[in-house]
Image (cartoon, rainbow, N blue to C red):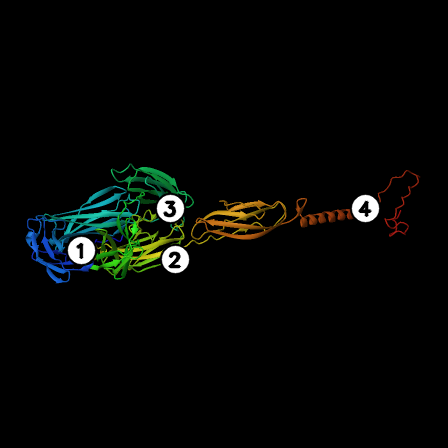
Amino acid sequence: MFGATAPLSTAVTESLAVFVFPPSPDQVYKVGDTVTVSIRVFNFGKGADADNLTVQLNRYSFEARWVSPIRTGLGNYNATFQIQSSDLNAFSYYGGYSLLEAYVVARIGLISAEQAAVIRAGTLLTATVTASPMVASPGQSVDVVVEVRTDGVLTDADAVYVNATVTSFPYSSTSIPIAVTHSATGTYEASYAVPSSIDGAGTIVLTAQALVRGNYTYASAYIFVSLPVRLDVWTHQVSTTDTSALVEVYAANQTAWPVADANVSMRYQALGYPYPSIPVERFGTTDRRGSATFNLTFDAHTYVTFWGNVTKGTDRAFYTGSVFPNYTPPAMIFEIRREAGFPFYEVGAVTLLNYTVRYSGFPIAGQTVYYYAATSSEVVANGSSLTDSVGRLQISFAMPAAPVRIDFATFIGSSWLSASDYVGGTRPLSVQHGELRIGAVTHVTVSVPPAPGPWAGIVLFVPYNFSAPYPYLPPTWLPGGSYGGVGSLIFPAGPTFSYDLRIPRFLPKDSDYLLAVEALSLNYSDLGNLIPYAYFEKVHITNAPPTLVADLSGSTLGPGEVLTVNLSRSADVDGLIDAYGVEWGDGSATGWVQTESVRHAYATSGDYTVTVQVRDDTGAIASMERTVHVETGILGLRVADFFALTGIVVAGVATSVALLIWRTRKRPRAPTAHLPNAPRPESPAMPPPPGHQGDSPLSPPPPP
């Protein structure tokens, strides 16, 4: 990602440095063309004239010759010569041209420094291969066109070979030849069907080889296989030792929710001297956080690669990753380390680079360091800097549209010591996006750069340690699928790229993230397009606390009545609810449990403060208090219910007695059977009602 042609290495010997720049590294010169090579000489960080300067062409050839340089300024020289047929090699290299070396040696006093530049000379043979469409689905037909040119003019080739290569991770690949048809001068056409068996997003490489009068050239293009992304897979390197690593594989769906109960397969293999290990296979199942954990054990190697599939129903996603076992670099006596680990800077902007100079493990204060920053075509900065009290120094320059190599030299003790660093330039890219938070699906829109295409884009969003020194190990969290673990590959629709960035809930909160977006030109004929258009943003994501919703079965309870607390409606906007807890207010509590609904009965009456809590997967807690009143009881009943019930019973009994008396008084006397001429029995006298003895009756007695 963000690659480009590296600058030419410099030659620094003690305090002396020399640079050699051809007029155009990309141009092919013809026999008879005049070429001028520029030479820069520096001493102690400043331009200086050489006591002696020699220029030799093709120093290892029987046709080697010398060129006399001409001084044009302090430390500046030009070497001009004409391309001769004897400068060309007996056979042509790839592309039909030869490489002509200009070897330069500069001397000041007893010190010398040397440097070489190469010039392409001869006939330029090129080929281009294009695929339409560039993005295809399994089973889709793709049109392939190959064009062959000699010095820019379409030329029929003696032979053209085209192959389509499908790579199977990690080491195998299948290459299928494609028959081409000659359709016009220098033009060849073919049709290729993307294999229906491909079940993962990736690339198919189309390679074309053209032979013209004994010379040959290669070209390549890509078919990007597009499949719907239904599972996002991430890998997290938890810990690593010399012989083992703990790796988590995570899965999320299209809404950034973790996928539980997915089947995960993993194969891993340790690589390195003296030979690779035998692949080991493991299986697992994702938990509620979407995670399956694997313990990788291996012999001491410098690199371990792993790969596999995550499957949930009919959805399947391939993933791959790597482990770098603990590596203790050899103790360096002299070291100049850049403090910021992010090596990309906008073209044209002033680049400030901070370094720390160390010797025998300690920073060196008050040390003079000479530096030279150069691309393959120019020196962009040179000079000297004095380290401060903690061994720090700073250099700055305007970032050119090319990678920059920076060489340092300093004298410590009795020796000259040197070190190097690289930084890269990028062109600005217009990017708009919504809120970036854990658990969100954020729409990202990227403007297509104002340069010839076709274009492809990469979007990467990962936890990132911006303070890590450079060089550094990759982030411990990485997308396991998409585009080789470095982001998601996207293609433009009209003037923009459009992408839905899913940020799964299992990613860490309270962390710094890097949003990196790059637009890549697929027009490989223009080497200037290798300087990427890119956008970088540092994003800090905090943890949102969970939202607590507590449903109580009541606020007033009778004796023995059970209180139910239901927390199932609680939620976490950027993660998962990890545990629930209730303190009942009577000294008892549930502790942290996984149960969303809990019950409790109080032994005695009174008012109780119930504290309910939920905790999310990062440990953030939300809580609230509710008051519950438990009433006093008689015979197991509430007091009010007891008196209400007893009142009903008393009233019922009184009513029944009164009704019975009333019915008795109102009931007519039953007839009595008498014997003939027998006397009638007398009615017994009614005693007076209580409290009325001796008084006249309240009502007349009933008739006899």
Query: With 299 as the anchor, is 600 left or right in this view?
Result: right
Residue type marked 3: Ala
Which circle, 1 or 3, is nearer the viewer? 1
Give how far across and how far down residue 561 sits, in percent: 61, 46
Residue type marked 2: Glu
Query: With 572 as the anchor, is 211 left or right in this view?
Result: left
Q: Can residue 448 be spotted in the picture?
A: no
Which circle, 2 or 1, is nearer the viewer? 1
Which circle, 1 or 4, is nearer the viewer? 1
Which residue lies under the disc numbered 2?
435
Mark 2 or 1 closer to N-term?
Answer: 1
Residue at mark 2 to residue at mark 1: CA–CA distance: 50 Å
Q: Which residue lies furthest to the top in this view?
A: 278
Q: Can residue 664 be spotted in the picture?
A: yes
Q: Which residue lies furthest to the bottom in this view?
A: 73
Mark 2 or 4 closer to N-term?
Answer: 2
Mark 1 or 4 closer to N-term?
Answer: 1
Identify the residue shown where x is 62% and y is 44%: 603
Which circle, 3 or 4, is nearer the viewer? 3
Query: With 349 as the anchor, is 692 left or right in this view?
Result: right
